[in-house]
Image: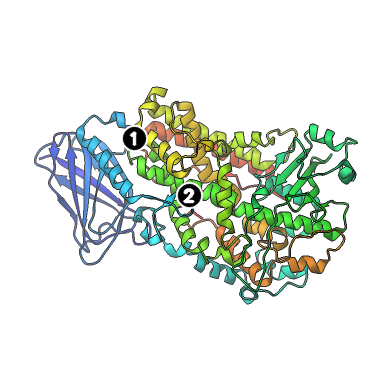
Amino acid sequence: MPSYTVTVATGSQWFAGTDDYVYLSLEGTSGCSERHLLDKPFYNDFERGAVDSYDVTVEEDLGEIQLIKIEKRKYWYQDDWYLKYITVKTPVGDYLEFPCYRWITDEKEIVLRDGRAKLPRDDKTQILKQHRRKELETRQKTYRWKEWHPGFPLSIDAHSHSDLPRDIQFDNEKGIDFILNYSKAMENLYVNRFMHMFQSSWSDFADFERIFVRISNTISEYVMQHWKEDFMFGYQFLNGCNPVLIRRCTEIPKKFPVTMDMVECSLERNLTLEEEVKQGNIFIVDYELLDGVDANKTDPCTIQYLAAPICLLYKNLENKIVPIAIQLGQKPGPDNPIFLPSDATYDWLLAKIWVRSSDFHIHQTVTHLLRTHLVSEVFSIAMFRQLPAVHPLFKLLVPHMRFTIAINTKAREQLICECGLFDKANATGGGGHVQMVQKAMKDLTYKSLCFPEEIKAKGMDSKEDIPYYYYRDDGIKVWETVKSFAEDVIHIYYESDEVVCEDVELQAFVKDIYVYGMRGVKTSGFPKAIRTREKLAEYLTVIIFTTSAQHAAVNFGQQYDWCSWIPNAPPTMRRPPPTEKGTVTIEQIVESLPDRGRSCWHLGAVWALSQFQDNELFLGMYPDEHFVEKPVKEAMAKFRKNLDEIVNAITERNKNKKLPYYYLSPDRIPNSVAV
């Protein structure tokens, strides 16, 4: 009688193994096998990290194996099992791989197809078409859209992390418990003694070092030493943790009436301000989005303030970007003066601090939360709802969705919810952050997620004119490498544009993102359908780049580098913006900055939010072998080789730099948004 050798691999996560009864049956083109009991309780099979083999004998040859059914029946207590994959050696010596990489919970069963990626058009038999349809029907009942706040991108329908499907939960929920991680941060940073000292101001700038010294490193120490200097202020718009706002100024806005007389002493080329603008030497950052946002009122003992400044910057003869004018409100007038480098030292310093605080708020809520976390969750939900596991695009994208829904659900549960941890230290807590996301949605367009186009749209694409914009340089390299990889995979499975158009699952995926994620807003520019291989490559690049590189660029510089020195990134201000010049004192500045308690909560936040996950998987690392075909594995190897070349180039450039830029080095870019 024919005999099949079945190999079963169990995951290496904690509690991945099982002691339950496990049954297997094979279904081929010529027939089905009976259920075979592979393991009895406490036979020591299916232990964590184990690979177990079994001989399955059948009455007659089953033909080509199409499906494997795995059933788990409870022995004593609920015992979830993480199944990595199954391989089958047929009687004629052929090997078939059946990827799984899923949890089997309770007394459920799963049906697996072999690992060869297939488009809908490739399935010819009714049994495969039915399996494909049933998988999506089940997923669409499990992964449901829900509106968390009006105007937000839709998110997963789950109140807590424990409500999520087991397959997308964190392996260890304690590892991403924000409250627990905040407490750990306080201990690690030795700031416990300050964390309850709300309303208690620091004595002076040096006093902030009492909570800084424990987390110092090369960049953060350099920031502490130079944060008051104009070159450091300007540099952060290019290569800090929020390098996405600066744009070339083509015309001085009427609402920001800067004159030649004001800035003449800052210009170095013997040109007028208008001529400097025409030559492309003037840049602008406008925080208009913060105008009208309500400041945090959750603590009646501390009034907190927000501002919506505008900052004009200048490229000097050393090619450094430096500030030359700051207005702290959107409406010009006598009570909204334009601050200048020629003003009194503390006037100019406080104006820059207000800009840095405003930049922090935009960074946290728009650049980071909305444009990486929430957008990536949209991609993830749509993928699970519309792409079956056998689809090549599911196999391509699933590593870049790892834990994204889980981290966002946990954030809604503990961090950005009403009375959440975000309210503790941030001036945009208590609802301001919600208003910001709602306002920022109008600028969330498809084109703005296309990295090279967004850089060009801001007038920041010239390496010759702006030579030290490493975020741009490294980002374009990573973008092009990701796009090349996407093109390689697309050309393996889509032989023509016509095949792209015919892929109903791809089109449903794209439509889900537009209709539900982006709320069907036409002005978002998100496509309703994809018609060509070229556009599909761009679309997949947007998804992979956003979930990996873009998130890394704006997340991992928060604590150790740019935000650990509180005066450089104040999460709140306790005095209103100055309305006249010549009155600011050092005491007023210190009183404006966060108190001791909020400073410590801020440090705990940025520390917890900028740590890599345990066993982090970085860009190009695909240990779960969803793809089994040789051409795709060759494309992956080429992808990793190209990424390694970028790593080497960045490492070489950063040698001996006082301010190295490494956030977009592929060996520091996690595959997905997971923190």
Q: Mark 1 against mark 2, which lies toward the viewer?
A: 1
Residue 233 pos. (x, y %): 75, 51
**In the drawing, what numbered circle is on residue 403?**
none
- Under circle 1, the secondary element is loop
Most foreground residue, 202 or 608: 202
Q: Residue at x 53, y 56 (%)?
A: 612
Indicate whether 404 appears above or below 489.
below
Q: Amino acid at mark 1?
A: Ala
Most foreground residue, 313 or 131: 313
Quarter of image, res 396: top left
Residue 542 pos. (x, y %): 51, 38
Residue 669 at least partly seen: no
- Residue linked to disc 1: 117
- Under circle 2, the secondary element is loop
Q: Residue at x 36, y 44 (%)?
A: 385
Indicate whether 134 appears above or below 171.
above
Q: Residue at x 26, y 64 (%)?
A: 78
Q: Residues within 10 Å of mark 2 (few under 14, many from 20)?
A: many
Q: Is residue 370 left or right of residue 273?
A: left
Most foreground residue, 639 or 568: 568
- Residue linked to disc 2: 617
Q: Is residue 311 left or right of residue 381?
A: right
Rendered-image quadrant of the N terminus: top left
Task: Tell me how far mark 1 sits from mark 2, CA to CA.
Answer: 23 Å
